[in-house]
Amino acid sequence: MKIYMVRHGESEGNLNLSVQSNTEPLTETGIKQAKTVAKRLKTIDIDVVVSSTAVRAVQTAKEIVNELGVPHIKTELMVERRHPSRFLGKPRSIAEFRKYELLRKENLNNPNWRFEDGENFFDVLDRVKKSKKFIEEMSEKHIVVVSHGIFIRNFFGYIFMGEKYSTEFVSDTLRMRTSNTGITVFDVEKIEGATKWSIRTWNDHSHLPSRYRDWE
C-alpha cells in the first residue's frame, strides 16, 4: 500500500493569515494548485481519494477526483487542529489569539487542559492514531489523502516515532514546513501480521511554481 498525503491548496485563511474554520474555501491560486497536483497524480494508478471534511480539503480533493475519476471518501478524523470558536475568521495577529497560543504552549503537557472548545495536542494525536488505523483497514493499494499542515506534521511525527511521539517533540515536528499541495509519501506493508509504515518522501512540491504559501 502506498499513501500520498497531500496538503490542501491555498485557502482564503492562508492568504489573509486568519484563524481558519472548516468553511474556509480555496483561493483562485489554491484551485490552480489543486488542478496542478491532480495532473501530477494522474501519472500514478490511484484507487481512491480520502479527505478531511473541511471545505478547503474537499475542494482540493474534488479537483483530484475529477482528474482521476476515482471515489472520494470524507472523514472528520483528518481535519486540522480545532481552534476555539471565538477566534475563527479573526486575524492570527490579534492580541487575544496570541495570548491563547502562549497559554496553549504553556499547557502543552496537560491532557486535561483545553481553551473553551479548542483541541489540545492529545486530541489531535488521538485523531492521528485513528486515521492511521482507518487507512490500514482500507483494501485499496494506492491512496491519496488530502489533509492539513499541522495534522500532516503530527501524523508524520507519529509514524516516525510511534508511541514515543509526545509533546517533547512537537515543536521540532511543527518546524517541518508544508507547502500547499505538497505531497508526503508513505509505504505501508503487512509483514507477518504486523503493519509497518515507512516514509518515502516529505513535502514534494516540485509541481508548484517557485513562489508558494506555507502557512497552516
Image: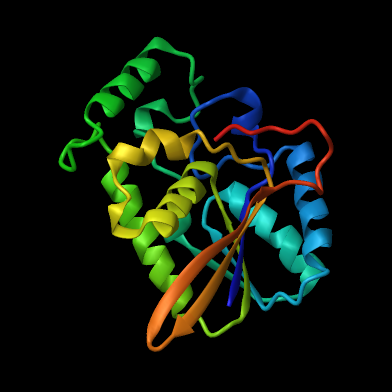
> Which residue occupies the foreground of this view, 159 or 5?
159
Residue farthest to the bottom, as pictured = 192
Q: Is residue 2 left or right of residue 36?
A: left
Image position of 42 with respect to 60: above or below: below
Residue 23 appears at what percent x and percent y?
Answer: 54, 43
Q: Is residue 138 left or right of residue 120?
A: right
Residue 210 figure quarter = top right
**Colour scheme shown:** rainbow
Image position of 198 with respect to 24: above or below: below
Residue 114 appears at what percent x and percent y?
Answer: 22, 36
Image position of 40 with respect to 106: above or below: below
Q: Residue at x 59, y 82 (%)?
A: 140
- Label total for image: 0
Q: Residue at x 57, y 70 (%)?
A: 187
Image position of 63 with respect to 44: above or below: above
Please indicate, yes or no, whether residue 120 appears anywhere in the rendered image: no
Please indicate, yes or no, whether residue 81 appears anywhere in the rendered image: yes
Residue 72 figure quarter = bottom right
Q: Residue at x 77, y 64 (%)?
A: 41
Residue 38 figure quarter = bottom right
Residue farthest to the front, as pictured = 192
In the picture, the quarter occupied by the C terminus is top right
In the picture, the quarter occupied by the N terminus is bottom right
Q: Residue at x 52, y 74 (%)?
A: 188
Q: Is residue 35 left or right of residue 119?
A: right
Residue 25 appears at what percent x and percent y?
Answer: 64, 42
> Which residue occupies the foreground of this view, 68 or 43?
43
Residue 178 appears at what percent x and percent y?
Answer: 60, 41
